[in-house]
């Protein structure tokens, strides 16, 4: 597997600390910048899913590849609808700079499938479950119902993506004789540079199998209303091997 996937000439990739600051207001420019940032996340998520298959698929049963190929296809669909939304609003993906922080997380965990699962789906994608309801509310407050509906659809899919990470991580830990929650916290402490901070979307995380047993030690009170998400527990894959 290559260390980095091929990338188009645009967007320009900047270090996170050099990214232009997005305003918090609901101006058209700020909304475009936010949609562009979301499209970039989905673009990188395509490569993250397929890299899991190519780099680590041999360590797992065939169902692992099936799961992550499906995730990659859904991430591609998410990117396509966000890019289409940008074009409807007079912009396009690549019109603004973006940062490569997500792929840096992949590079930092390229040596260990459990580290990759712990950080990418179970920290970074799970954070999307936390912040997307707020983002939807921002677009609703500016009367952009179309973008809000797109993000609501993406949120439902992302619950399944986090669930895939939790399932395969947990099964690999069981084979090794490790506690999934304890192993996750140890890997996060080693490989995640940021801070796990509230608010946490407990209902969406629980639907994905990422219960408070994992992150409860860093959780605090939050203001999310209770929202019922369908459980992702059915269809458990076969046990992982060679780990």
Image (tube, rainbow, N blue to C red):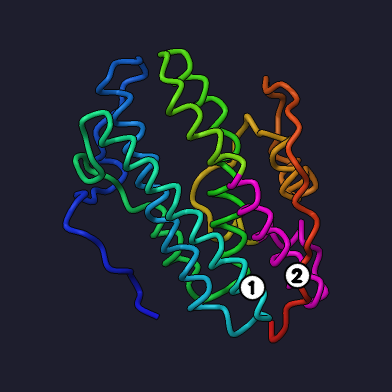
- Image quadrant containing the C terminus: bottom right
Question: How far apart are the two marked residues, 2 and 1, measured between alpha carbons?
Answer: 8 Å
Q: Quick one: label 2 or label 1, which is nearer the N terminus? A: 1
Does 183 lie within the magenta span?
yes
Q: Residue at x 72, y 35 (%)?
A: 202
Q: Nearer the viewer, residue 78 or 113?
A: 78
**In terms of depth relative to the viewer, which is nearer, 182 or 104?**
104
- By secondary structure, the bulk of the magenta-drawn segment is best described as helix
Assess whether mark 1 and mark 2 are in contact (beta carbons under 8 angstroms): yes
Residue 176: x, y in percent? 78, 77
* In the image: residue 189, left or right of residue 210: left
| Residue at image coords 53%, 49% | 124
Residue sitting at x 70%, y 42%: 205
As displayed, is residue 227 above or below residue 184?
above
Q: Is residue 181 left or right of residue 23?
A: right
Count of number-bearing discs: 2
* Mark 2 residue element: loop
Neighbour class for label 1 at 10 Å: few (<14), some, many (≥20)? many
241 versus 167 height, above or below:
below
Any magenta on residue 119? Answer: no
Give SS at disc 1.
Answer: helix
The N terminus - image quarter? bottom left
Residue at (67, 19) in percent of width and height:
223
Residue 211 lies, in percent from the top left, at 77, 45
Q: Position of residue 139 (x, y in %)?
A: 44, 21
Location of mark 2 (residue): 237
- Name the residue tied to disc 1: 64
- In the rendered structure, which segment of residues is drawn in magenta? 157-186
């Amino acid at each position: 597997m290559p260390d980095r996937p091929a990338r188009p000439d645009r967007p320009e990739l900047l270090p996170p600390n050099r990214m232009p600051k997005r305003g918090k207001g609901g101006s058209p420019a700020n909304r475009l910048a936010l949609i562009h940032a979301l499209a970039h996340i989905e673009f990188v998520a395509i490569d993250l899913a397929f890299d899991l298959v190519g780099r680590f698929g041999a360590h797992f049963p065939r169902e692992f590849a099936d799961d992550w190929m499906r995730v990659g296809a859904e991430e591609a669909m998410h990117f396509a609808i966000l890019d289409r939304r940008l074009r409807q609003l007079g912009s396009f993906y690549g019109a603004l700079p973006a940062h490569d922080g997500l792929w840096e997380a992949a590079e930092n965990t390229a040596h260990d499938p459990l580290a990759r699962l712990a950080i990418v789906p179970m920290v970074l994608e799970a954070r999307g479950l936390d912040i997307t309801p707020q983002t939807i509310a921002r677009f609703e407050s500016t009367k952009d119902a179309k973008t809000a509906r797109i993000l609501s659809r993406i949120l439902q899919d992302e619950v399944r993506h986090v669930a895939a990470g939790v399932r395969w991580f947990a099964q690999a830990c069981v084979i090794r004789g490790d506690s999934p929650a304890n192993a996750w916290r140890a890997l996060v402490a080693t490989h995640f540079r940021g801070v796990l901070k509230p608010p946490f979307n407990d209902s969406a995380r629980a639907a994905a199998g990422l219960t408070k047993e994992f992150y409860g030690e860093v959780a605090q009170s939050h203001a999310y209303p209770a929202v019922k998400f369908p459980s992702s527990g059915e269809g458990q894959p076969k046990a992982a091997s060679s780990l």
